[in-house]
Image (cartoon, rainbow, N blue to C red):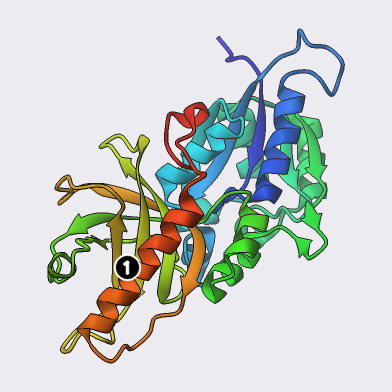
Amino acid sequence: MRRASTVVVIGNFDGVHRGHQAVLADAAHRARGESSGDLSDERELVVLTFDPHPSAVVGRGEPARLTTLPRRIELLERHGASRVVVKKFDKAFAAQSPEEFAKNLLANELHASEVVVGQNFRFGAKRAGDFSTLAELGKDLGFSTHAHAVAEDDRGPFSSTRARGAIEKGDLEEAVAVLGRWHATSGVVIEGAKLGRTFGFPTANLGDIPELPPPNGIYAVLVDELDPSGRARALAHGAMSIGVRPTIEGASGRTHEVYLLDFSRDLYGARLRVHFVAHLRPELKLPNIDALKAQMTEDVQACRTILAKFAPRPEIGGAYG
């Protein structure tokens, strides 16, 4: 028996930024039957996305990631997806013609009755298909098509590229403007040099960080803990240092260390998600350890002040973001 028809929205969705959110909102509106005025015509909203990023397969090089795949799925569902379908993007997938993509995947597998994409959507081998191609194929395959206008603000279109540029420059306000939330990185707590505890500021050292980090410096952060299924819950406010620890003699390598305010549990092996709320200052080479302790004390107090108004959000399961 043929599965009930769906509204399918297609994209890479790295970052699930405000432009993506606008497309998802439009698709959800259509899935509920509100665009046609027939609320009895409610359909499942399916998001079709790809992993790895197509650029990594077609030779353009994979861009720095804004979100991991589990985080992308989490955010897509938060913004209305009933189901997220992730297709492995490999050379065989990339070699499909636009006709094969539309027939085999959209019509036969996903049972699309409507397909929503961004205006700059391209698909099929060598990006041969565009929105006009999709619309023509849809007429024969039984689905309608809709191209959502590019969402933008007074600085320009929202895009993953724009978000990456802001994060790379450490412009957290611009990143929030594009993403609609704080940028976050995640990592596993690993054993470090344990110097922070000798200063009175024991830190959780994060390794295996897949997302694009901001530049070296000190940040006010909110920290979630991720369980094995990827579900997040709020853990603590924090002060985070990213950098090479120039004041510490013999320090080497870039580290990501977060001091959790008013928190003492052993976190080795835990996976944390760190939301970057504010940039306090760049990394500094201080004259001695006493000066470093004094600066850390000042940084922690600044973080307390900045973060005091932020509490876990019950609407997303009690996490920070």
Q: Is residue 121 visible?
A: yes
Q: Which residue is mark 1?
A: 297
Q: Is residue 52 visible?
A: no
Residue furthest bottom as drawn:
287
**Whole-percent x, y for residue 199 in the image:** 18, 70
The picture quadrant where one finds residue 82 is top right
Q: In front: 194, or 76?
A: 194
Q: Secondary structure at mark 1?
A: helix
Left/right placement of residue 66 relative to residue 244 reads right
**Residue at the (39%, 81%) spot, across then down:** 283
Q: In front: 3, or 220?
A: 220
- The answer to whether 104 is drawn above or below residue 251 in the figure is above
Within 10 Å of disc 1 (Cα), the crowding (few <14, some 14-19, many 20+) is some
Q: In front: 157, or 218?
A: 218
Q: How many marks?
A: 1
- The answer to whether 145 is drawn above or below residue 65 in the figure is above
**Whole-percent x, y for residue 310 in the image:** 50, 43
Q: In front: 51, or 211?
A: 211
Left/right placement of residue 285 relative to residue 275 reads left
**Whole-percent x, y for residue 115 in the image:** 72, 35
Q: Amino acid at mark 1?
A: Thr
Left/right placement of residue 48 relative to residue 251 reads right
**Whole-percent x, y for residue 241 in the image:** 34, 69
- The answer to whether 311 is drawn above or below residue 285 in the figure is above
- The answer to whether 84 is drawn above or below residue 243 in the figure is above
Quadrant where the image shows the N terminus: top right
